[in-house]
Amino acid sequence: MPFVTFLAGRIFKALLVIVAIAALNFLLIRLAPGDPASVMAGEAGATDPKYVDMLRARFGLDQPLWKQLALYLGQIVQFDLGFSYRNQVPVIALIGERLPATLLLMASSFVVSLVLGLGLGMAAAGVRFFGRARWLDSAIMSIALIFYATPLFWLALMMVLVFSVQLDWLPAFGMESVGANLKGWARIVDIAQHLVLPTLALSLFFMSVYVRLARAAMMEVMTQDHVRTGFAKGLTGGEVLRRHVFRNALLPIVTFAGIQLGQVAGGAVLIETVFAWPGIGRLMFDALLQRDYQLLLGVFLVTSATVIFFNLLTDIAYRFVDPRIRLEGGAR
Amino acid sequence: MSNRVFKTSKTRLSRTRLALAGLALSALSMGAAAQTKGGTLNGIVQPEPPTLMLGMNQQAPTIYVAGKIYQSLMTYSPDLKPQPELAKSWVMSADGLTYTFELEPNVKWHDGKPFTAEDVAFTVGTFLRKTHPRANVVLNRYLASATALSPTKVEFKLKEPFGPFLLLFEVSTLPMVPKHIYDGTDYATNPANQTPIGTGPFKFKEWKRGSHIHLVKNENYWKPGKPYLDEIYFRVIPDSASRALAFEKGDVQVLRGGDVDNVDVRRLRALKGVTTTTAGWESYSPLAFMMMNNRKAPFDNVKVRQAVMHAIDKNFISSTIFFGLAKPANGPLASTTLFNDPSLKAAPFNIARAKELVKESGVDLSKSPVKILSFPYGAQWERLAEYVKQGLEQVGFTVSIEPADAGSWAKRVSDWDFDLSFNFTYQYGDPALGVARHYLSTNIVKGSPFANNQGYNNPKVDALLVKAASSTDPAERGKLYTEFQKIAVDEVANGYLAELQFATLYRANIKNLVKTGIGLNETLDDAWIEK
C-alpha cells in the first residue's frame, strides 16, 4: 500500500503545482509589451485603431486582468485549454498535432544519448579500472568534451551540409517526405530517415554529459570497500564492474536522465527550427512572438505536466536502482 | 544502417528519374505544345501564417499562398494598368461616382456553386467592410453601395470620387469570397476559414501546421486549359539558413523575396540553373523610412530632422546594408509607382551641413538623448540601426539602441512610445492607398503601427492629399502629389531611406512565374515547368 499512497499524494501535489504554474505563467506573459491584437494589427498593416479594439474585444482582452485569470483557471480545471486567438483553432488540437513529433524526437534522442553515453562512459571507466589502453579513456573524454562544447545549431547545420547537401544520404528537413503519400512500412522508413539527423544533433550533447557522469560516478565507486570485497570473494573483473560498480554508479545518471526528459519535452527549439521539425518547441516559440496567450499557456501547461510526470517516474526508478531508497506517502 | 539509408534514397532517385523520363516522353508525343502540363512546384511559406482567409489576414505569406486560391476582379501589369481577371470589362461614369463591372460568366467556386455578381456585392459591400484590416477604411469612407444588376453585372456607387478606385481590385485588397458560405454567419469563427474556398486555379487540400500547405489543381477552373501545374506545396522551414540550403538542395524551387537573408541571395543567385528577378513588386513597392517622433525634443524641430537626413549616406544603406537589393529613395513615393517626381533631390550626405543645421536649430542635443527602437524584421534592420547610431553620433547626438521583438515594436510604435524607429510599407500603386495614411493628420491615432505614428501635422499637406485622393484626373493628381512630395522631403515628414527590392529566385526550368505587378502573389495559372 505505501506505493499507492505515495502515488496518490504525488499526483495531488502535482495538480496543485500545475494550477499554480498556470496562474504564474498567465501573469508572467502579460509583462511582455504588446498583445495578440497589436501583433496581428502590426502584421496585417491595419490602419484602423477600431479594428484593433474589435480584435481585443473578440479575444476578451478588454476585460480586467483578474477576470481573465479567473476565466482561464476556470477553463483549466475543466480540462479546457481554450482557443488560439490567432489560429482560430482549439489549443488542444494545435498541441495534439505537434506533440507526437516532439515525443518521437525526444524518445529517440533519449535512447541514443543514454545508450551511447553509458557505453562510452563505461568503456572509459573500464579501461582505467583495468589499467589498460589508457589512450581510449583520453580519446572518449576528448570526444565528449568537443560535443559538450559545440553549439547545437552549428552542429546541426554542418550535419545538413555534409550528410544532406554534399553526400545526399539523408533528408534535411521536415518529418516526412512532403507529397510522397507513403503508407505503412515505407512511411515508417521515411520518418526514420528524417529522424536521423535531428536525433543525432540533439543526442550528442546529452551523450557527452552521460559519458562524463557515468565515468566519474564509476571511478568514485571503484575505490570503495565493497569492490575490494568483490575481488576478494573471487569475482572476475568484468563481474565486479557490472554488478558492483555500475549499479552503484547509476543513481546520478537516473537523476540526469529525468532532467533530460523534462527538458526535451519542452521542445528542442533550436533543433526543431534548424531541421524544420514540426514539434512543440517551435509552436511555443511562435506563440510567444505572436503573444498568442492561450496557446502559449497551453504549451506551458502540457510541458510542465510532462516534466512532473517524468519526475515521478524518476522517483520510482530510484527505488529499483537503489532499494535503500523508500517511497514515502505524499503529504507529510 | 547508413548503407540501407543510402540504398533507399538511391532507389527513390532512380524512380523519380524514371518518372521524369516518362513525363518527357509524353510531352514529346503531345507535339509542339509550348507549355508542358503537370508538375509540382515547391515554395516556402515564411513565417507560417495563422490563416489563409485572405479577407481577414493580410500578412505577406497569407497573400502569397491565398493568392492562388482567391481572385479579385482585376490584376495589374508591371506599370500598374488594370488587367481583366474575374471582371471582363468596366466603365466609370462621367462624375466618377459610379463604376459598373461586367463579370466573367461560367466561373465556379471550388465547391461547385456558381460565382455571380451577388458574391461581388456581398464581398465588397458587406464582408470586407467588416473584416479587412486595411481596405475597410477605404470602403467605409468612399463606398456607398455595391449592387448586383444581373448575375454578371455589378455596380459600385461612391459617396465621393476616389481617384485610385480602379487600383483596389488586387487580390489582397479585395479578394472575392463566397456569399453562400459567409452570409449571415459570424465571419471570424466560420469553420470555412480553415478550408478556404475561392475561384482560383488552385484548391486548398491540406495544411499540416509546422510542416506544409498543399494546394492542388482546380480541374474546373474557368480559364480553359489552365492551370498548368498539378500541385503546389508551400513548406514551413523556420530557419533562414535552412531555407537557403533547401533551395540549394532542390527541395524547393522558388524563393520569394525575404525568404532568405540578402547575404544568401548573393550566393544562391550565382548557382547554376538559378534565375533571379526583382520584378513583380511594382504594386507593393515597399519603401523603407525612418520615423522620428515629431512630438518631442529633439525631433520636434524641423532643422534637427533635416540634420539627420544629412548625417546618413543613403547610397551606403542601399549598397552595403541591403546588399545592393535596394535603391536610395528620393521621397515618400517609390519610383515604381504612379506620381513619383523623378526631379526631386534627396538631402545629400554631408556631415558638416548636418552640424550647421543643428547649430541653426539652437537645440542642445546633449539634453535630449535619442533611443533608436530597433525594427525586428531581420539582421539588416539591426545593421541599419547601428549605422544610423554612428551617423547621428558624429553630428553630436547621444544615441542608444533598444531591442524589440515584433509584438513590442508594434505596441510601442502604435502608442507613440519611441524617439526614432524604422518601418517599411507597401504602397499599393497609388499614394492614396499606401502612402497618405502616414501623413494625414486625421490619421494621428493610437492603435496601429501603420498610421501617422510620427505625429506629422501640416494642414497644407492634409489639403493636398485629400484633394488628390478625390480627383479622378491623373494630370491634376500628379500636380498635387508633386507638391506633396516636395513638402514631405523638405520638412522630413519621414526620413526616406530606400526603395527595397525583393529578389525572387527560382530554378530556370520554371516559366511564366513573375508576369504582373503583383508578382508571386498572382494566381500562377500561367506558370509551367519545362521538363
Image (tube, coloured by chain):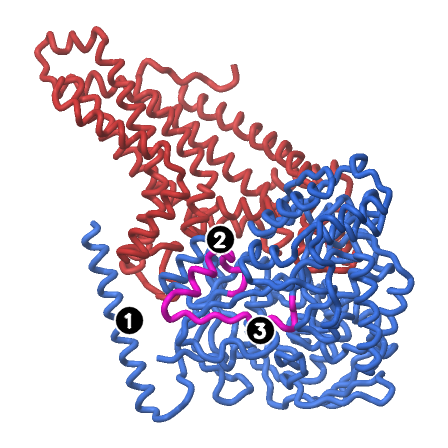
Chain colours: A red, B blue
The structure residue drawn at horizontal position 84% and vertical position 52%, both measured from the top left corner, is: B302
Q: Earlier in the sequence, mark 3 or mark 2?
A: 2
Few, some or many C-alpha atoms within 10 Å of disc 2 (few <14, some 14-19, many ≥20)? many
Magenta highlight range: B256-285
Counting from the top left corner in percent of width and height, residue B60 is at 60, 63
Residue B99's place in the image compared with B492, above or below, is: below
The subunit letter for the residue under badge 1 reads B
Which amino acid lies under the numbered mark 3 shown in the image of this protein?
Gly
* Residue on which disc 1 sits: B16
| Residue A267 seen in render | yes
Q: Position of residue A138 (x, y in %)?
A: 22, 25
Q: Quadrant of residue A228?
A: top left
| Amino acid identity at mark 2 | Pro
Is label 3 in a helix, a strand or a loop?
Answer: loop
Name the residue carrying label 2: B238
- The chain letter for the residue carrying disc 2 is B
Residue depicted at x 69% and y 70%? B428
The lab-note entry on whether marks 1 and 2 share a chain reads yes
User: Which of the 4 image quadrants contains residue A6?
Assistant: top left
Q: Residue furthest front?
A: B352
Q: Residues within 10 Å of mark 3 (few under 14, many from 20)?
A: many
